[in-house]
Image: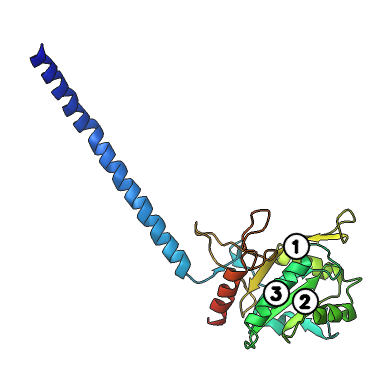
Amino acid sequence: MKKYSYVGISFIMLLFGIIFVPRIVDRIKETKIVSNSRMSADNKITNEKLSYILINGEKKQIPEFALRNQDSLIITQHDYKGKVTVVDFFFVNCPTICPKMTSNLVYLQNEFKQTTDFAIASFTINPKYDTPTRLKKYAESHKVTNPNWHFLTGDREQIYNLAKKSFNLFAEQNPNVPGGFEHSGYFALMDKQGFIRSRYDVHGNPIIYYRGTVSLEEKIADNGEEEQISILKKDIQKLLEE
């Protein structure tokens, strides 16, 4: 009986080796390949140039516009040519996210204060109230010193078209929310030719926009959102060096 048992056990072990061992080896090989691929992809993403935002296969670029800034000067898209620009939409009497967004932009302004080809474009979504005079007071109260930081007001339809169609950033008048308006809390980043750019995420997809409502000091907001001002700063520098 023992002899037959040993033979049976040997047969089972041989069968296991023939059928299952190659599969285990293959699985290990596949795992190594996946791990190596992910590591290579991550390294590639880290070192790659910033992505262009493509709409229907075309690079997304800021269109023509003409609006007044806080000094009552007409500013067009041409004023941003040759400059790396951060774009946001806000309004002066915003009681929620705008103060924090402006504070983060002031931080970036101060970080690049010696850089003449860095600009900021802040479009008000309440142009009826936000006159150049009010925008000037807002800029002064937030210690805006960059001559290329324009707070822009003018035709409402033009501004909302820029927000929704050009930058795909949400902006709406809503009497049921604090301040009467609601909008995206993200920043867009434009290169010196006016193309919208961004870094890639860990999966190789462009992040498109940068979170503007969490400060560098906060690191992580109460809702779990992480700050992106630090990566925006790095990407501004990357575009400045292009």
Q: For the residues carrying marks 3 and 1, which lies nearer the camera in this image?
A: 3
Residue 6 percent location from the top left of the image:
11, 19
At label 1, counting other C-alpha atoms closer than 10 Å, the crowd grade (few under 14, some 14-19, many 20 or more) is few
Residue pointed to by mark 2: 65
- The image shows residue 33, relative to residue 218, as above or below, that is above
Q: For the residues carrying marks 3 and 2, which lies nearer the camera in this image?
A: 3
In which quadrant is the N terminus drawn? Answer: top left
Secondary structure at badge 3 equals helix
Disc 3 residue type (three-letter): Leu
Residue pointed to by mark 1: 164
**Residue 131 occupies quadrant:** bottom right
Q: What residue appears at the point 59 percent right and 61 percent down from the top-left corner?
A: 207
Secondary structure at badge 1 equals helix
At label 3, counting other C-alpha atoms closer than 10 Å, the crowd grade (few under 14, some 14-19, many 20 or more) is many
C-alpha separation, residue under disc 1 versus residue under disc 2: 14 Å
Secondary structure at badge 2 equals loop
- The image shows residue 18, relative to residue 28, as above or below, that is above
